[in-house]
Amino acid sequence: MSATPLPPGQPPPPSGADGAGGLPPPPGTDMTGICFRDQLWLNTYPLDRNLVFDYFALSPFYDITCNNESLRSRQIHPLDMSQLTKMTGMEYVLSDVIEPNLFVIRKQKRESPEKANPMLAYYILDGSIYQAPQLCNVFASRISRAMYHISKAFTMACSKLEKIANVETESDAAAFESKTQKEAIDLKELKRIDHILSSLKRKIGAAPPPPPYPEGYVPPSSEQEKAPDDLLASEAPPQLDPIIDQGPAKRPRFQ
């Protein structure tokens, strides 16, 4: 990667014992609650893969003790991988780029030219710089949000079920009370009806006995009364069997 000069107006990094005392403190590991944006720089310089690291170096996420800063002091492009792989320590690399809207910068610790351990990730979205949250924090936040909604759903369902149970209990109690009231016997009304019936019986008197049979008439016995019914039952035609007498072979055919 070719070397590019620092943007105009940017002071050179401090060097030596005098400059070491003025170094800013290293950035924290959890800075997901802040973002950085320099609108004046964005209006002055284009945001592309050649100048994006110079813009990132202005943010509080930048650690001035990284290897990239050493390359900048030697007028070498800070993202030159041919130079970074020769060094060990903390460095920043450009991992993903979608110009000019999205740039992903990864902070990692290099132990050898082939081995580098990722530490943190930052992304520049439309000129605003953010720290990407760690995967464990993302899982914890999503699980906490899911548990909140599940708990809220169970609370709402319990309240609905309690209302339904109360309504059913009230309706059952009302139906039982109405049924009890209908089935309840009013003793006063029963005594009043008995008094009316007894008074009517005294006024009307007992029923007269049935008149005697005419002379020469013999009343039929119970066996003779049942005989005509038995005769009619024996003369009645037998019932048709729905399978034998009305099967498919005996149904009428229409031409």
Image (tube, helix red, strand yellow):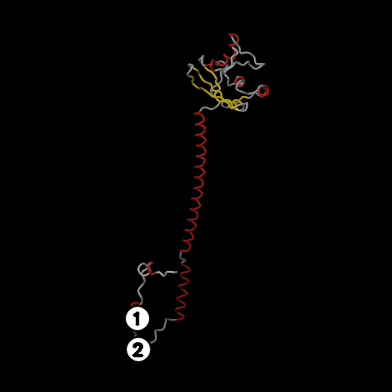
Tell me what residue is drawn at x 66 percent, y 21 percent: 45
Q: CA distance from mark 1 to mark 2?
A: 20 Å
Q: Position of residue 47 (x, y in %)?
A: 63, 23
Quick one: label 2, few (<14), some, or many (20+) residues within 10 Å?
few
* Quarter of the image where one finds residue 58: top right
Which amino acid is tagged 1? Answer: Pro
Residue situated furthest top in the rendering: 17
Question: Mark 1 highlights which residue?
Answer: 228
Tell me what residue is drawn at x 34 percent, y 84 percent: 220
Tell me what residue is drawn at x 37 percent, y 68 percent: 249
Q: Position of residue 174 (x, y in %)?
A: 50, 57
Q: Are marks 1 and 2 in contact (CB under 8 Å)?
A: no
The quadrant the C terminus occupies is bottom left
Q: Position of residue 13 (x, y in %)?
A: 61, 13
The quadrant the N terminus occupies is top right
- Find numbered disc 2 in the image and state the secondary structure of the residue it sits on: loop
- Find numbered disc 1 in the image and state the secondary structure of the residue it sits on: helix
In this view of the protein, which residue sits in the foreground, 104 or 192? Answer: 104
Quick one: label 1, few (<14), some, or many (20+) residues within 10 Å?
few
Instruction: Using the image, tell me which numbered label, if any, was put on residue 217.
Output: 2
